[in-house]
Image (cartoon, rainbow, N blue to C red):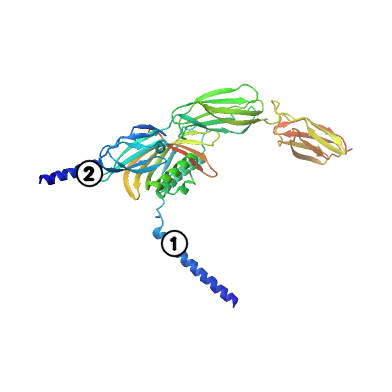
Amino acid sequence: MKLTLRSKTLRYRLRVATALSMFLLILGGIFGPPVLAEQPLPQVQLNADSLGPRKIEDLTEKSISRDYALAWQNLSQAVEQNRADLLDAYFTGLAKDDFTQLIGDQKNSGAHIRYLDHGHKLEALFYSPAGDAIQLQDQAQLEIQYLDGDKVIQSEQVTYHYIVLMTPGADRWMVRDLENAPQSKP
Amino acid sequence: MRQLLTGFMCLLTAAASASAAELRPPAQVTAGTAFSIPAGGSGKATFYLYGPAQVSKRELDLGSEIQVQAEEVERAGLYTAILCGSSGPCSSANFYVRPGEPDRLTLLVHPSRVPVSAANAISAVAVVFDALHNMVLTPVPVKFNVSPKEGASISQTRNSSNGIAWIRMTSAPKGGPAKLEAVIGKTSEVRVVQQVASDACNLNIRGGWVARRFTVETAPVRDCTGNFVPDGTVVSFTKIDDSGKTTVDVPIKRGIAKVEMPVSGSARITAASGVASGNELSVGGAR
């Protein structure tokens, strides 16, 4: 008798919990942030023909291209959705600080940037003798939309030149610095 | 009719003045420096400034200069200024914020411990930044100083390329700490590289009976330039006797490696560490 009563109470609690969860899910769907489609992985071509002083291994070259593409995919999503946590995976140091600040400003001002990424041509400039840092020059084809809330106030197709510093993490290469080079031509 | 036309013209003028404010920012600005952007027209407008690490937005009255604060342009790179009047399209302009004067260094030195007399074994990479952590991409002379514990300092200057200057060095023949310093202007960064003895050069062993046990030990183990080989380096002792061959690995402790070896009958004992080997001991029967 005691057991039956306990199981009935448990069943009741389970139903209440399920109903509450469903309610919260629906509420989240209505009032929560819009879930945006994942940005496609941008194309990245890496040319390491004139790299020095250390030669780059094939596997490292592939890892850098892959991780740089993933970094840009994450960056596009992070600035679009105002989610600084998305930077953790592929950004560190100054680059992470910068984009975290950018996202903080976006939240405060209501204005934000949207990157539509049309690909990157990377040229490897410097690979440290110890293999603990690589510097790249990126010629990025981007469409940048400047928004206030959901309204696009300006949009431009640009070719930006970036100087990139990447360092190895536990299982991937991380972007440590990403700086517009002066020869950038809007 | 004339009044109607005049009114219409006035409206057009007002709309035009509120929308056609052209932005003329300076072509180049130094990071962390306040400046102003002339903006013509009249009426209310919204000003946006999008940069590599910041976004700002504010309402303003047209007709006066737009003040951009130093904090809004701390990061080097391309900025986009957009001005939207109360009606009509927005106007925009891009400008480049360049890094300030070289002021900071990041110095990567590898490895932290290196064997003596190892050719090109030490590398130092210096990254040049301004006071606001922008990488300075124009060439900057970076001076590298190496000061061993004993002996004269050595200096070399390298120009940075895209913010990076680097150097490769051979370690000194004597062990001990070496101070490696990178200098730009009044700023410097220092790292210390511990230069340790290289592999053992040759081994000298001796043995003796102590309380019916045969003990073998090396003389203090040194590399070929006379530095003590670090503790923990393994010395392998090998005994060959009637029962066959026995090898014991012993780490160096306080400069020497020492082991007790059971000996019955005659035996030959040798020692080796890395590629170095030593003298051979011939031992008689047990005592």
Please, which residue is most extreme toward the bottom here? A1
Q: Quadrant of the C terminus of chain B?
A: top right
Whether residue A185 can be seen here: no
Query: Is the same chain shared between marks 1 and 2?
Result: no
B156 over A163 or under it: above or below: above
Label 1, secondary structure: give it.
Answer: helix
Please, which residue is most extreme toward the top here? B152
Question: Given the image, what chain letter belongs to the residue carrying mark 1?
Answer: A
Whether residue B152 can be seen here: yes
* Mark 1 or mark 2, whichever is nearer to me: 2
* Label ID, residue A25: 1
Residue for badge 2: B15
Q: Position of residue B114 (x, y in %)?
A: 63, 31
B277 over A58 or under it: above or below: above
Q: Position of residue B259 (x, y in %)?
A: 79, 38
Horizontal arrangement in the rendering, residue B107 relative to residue A25 (left or right): right
Please, which residue is most extreme toward the right here? B287
Q: Amino acid at mark 2?
A: Ala
Horizontal arrangement in the rendering, residue B26 relative to residue B277 (left or right): left
Rounded to the nearest angstrom, the CA distance separating label 1 from label 2 is 47 Å
B277 over A87 or under it: above or below: above
Q: Write the residue at 61% across / 34% down.
A: B112
